[in-house]
Image: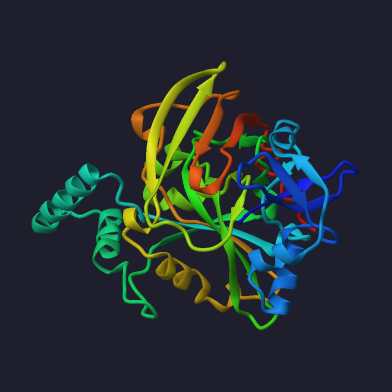
Amino acid sequence: MRLIQLQDDAGDVRVGVVSPDGAQVRLLDGLDGTYALASVAIATGRSLADEAEATPGATRLDYPALLAAGRVLPPLQHPDPAHCLVTGTGLTHLGSAAARDAMHQKLQQQAEEGSLTDSMRMFQWGVEGGMPAPGKPGAQPEWFYKGDGGILAAPGAELASPDFALDGGEEPELVGLYLIGPDGTPHRLGFAIGNEFSDHVTERQNYLYLAHSKLRACAVGPELRTGALPRDLRGTSRLRRDGAVVWEKPFLTGEANMCHSLENLEYHHFKYAAHRRPGDVHLHFFGTATLSFADGVRAQPGDEFEIELPELGAPLRNRLRAVAAGFAPGGVRAL
């Protein structure tokens, strides 16, 4: 099932079910968003899809028109953005078969030479131990924090890059969407397309700057897909400038193209008690192996990122906007 959040004609937040052909959205009555729907599903013991199917609602809206009007919101939000944690894991994807073979050869050569970097060593741990047997912990992935729910940009909205940023580039990724139940159990609602959006120049200066490079806006959506995912997912990432495509490349995701299982990545995120606080929302990016920056392309203000992953519904599109940081040295006030 495909779910979206949207603003209805009165400006209220609603949750809707996308028709199989992507033409219409059925609004669900009595619910002010996916958070409310998921909370009811947890309380009733139903799956999210079953709860949506059982919820009445006869109003149908034109889905492409909603997207064009900017009325589609991120597919999951918390009523209080401070209770939404946006995080991610890196060094998780193998890329294409050719890239995979080259990576294995490089790992073997560097291991023999004793010249493995810290990043390559962590990637090697994932290749060797990131796919443990079900129910068993595997190798820890790289983990990072992006921000709370306040950094989320809606589909079609602008992605703001602060004036202190050295770069602002797309990262096409799969995102897991979670709600922590009253007893502290993480519930996966489903998956969505994400643009993790990072400062790659800052990160390249030194890998210890990774944390700084990730504290940026991001976009998720438009749709939440419930249920299990295909193991092999194939999409396309594009960069448009003045209406013309200046960069385009296919990308691979899903467990068939990763060195960590989703279960292993979820375990290493939710093993921390602070990440299992009842009522909290978690949006977790699972990583990528495809970047325009890696091909020498630098995004400019006004450029549009487009991430298309057909198995997860409509594409995710956002424009890049440079903004003032709003804070200067000496801005801390002593009391």
Place residue 122 in its image quadrant. Answer: bottom left
Using the image as rendered, state which of residue 262 and residue 63 is in the foreground: 63
Pick whichever, 93 or 83, lies toward us. 93
Residue sticking out furthest to the bottom: 183
Q: Residue at x 49, y 69 (%)?
A: 269
**At x 82% / y 56%, what residue is drawn?**
57
Observer-nearest residue: 247 or 9? 9
- Compared to residue 15, the image places residue 272 above or below, namely below
Q: Position of residue 165 (x, y in %)?
A: 54, 36
Height in image: 281 above or below 203? below
In this picture, is 62 found above or below 182? above
Q: Position of residue 300 (x, y in %)?
A: 53, 24
Identify the image's colour scheme: rainbow, by chain, secondary structure or one colour: rainbow
Left or right of 286? Residue 153 is: right
Assign the N terminus to one quadrant of the image. Answer: bottom right
Q: Is residue 94 above or below residue 85?
A: above
Residue sitting at the far left? 112
Q: Is residue 295 left or right of residue 186?
A: left
Residue located 59% across and 34% down the image: 317
Regarding residue 53, the answer to whether it shows in the image is yes
Q: Give residue 65's position: percent from left, percent from top.
A: 73, 33
Quarter of the image where the C terminus is located:
bottom right
Quadrant of the rendered image containing residue 23: top right
Is 250 on the left-hand or right-hand side of 229? left
Q: Position of residue 38 (x, y in %)?
A: 70, 67
Taking the spot 87% from the left edge, 44% from the top edge, the residue there is: 11
Outermost residue toward the right in this view: 10
**Between residues 203 and 189, which one lies in front from this camera angle?**
189
From where the camera sits, is residue 163 visible?
no
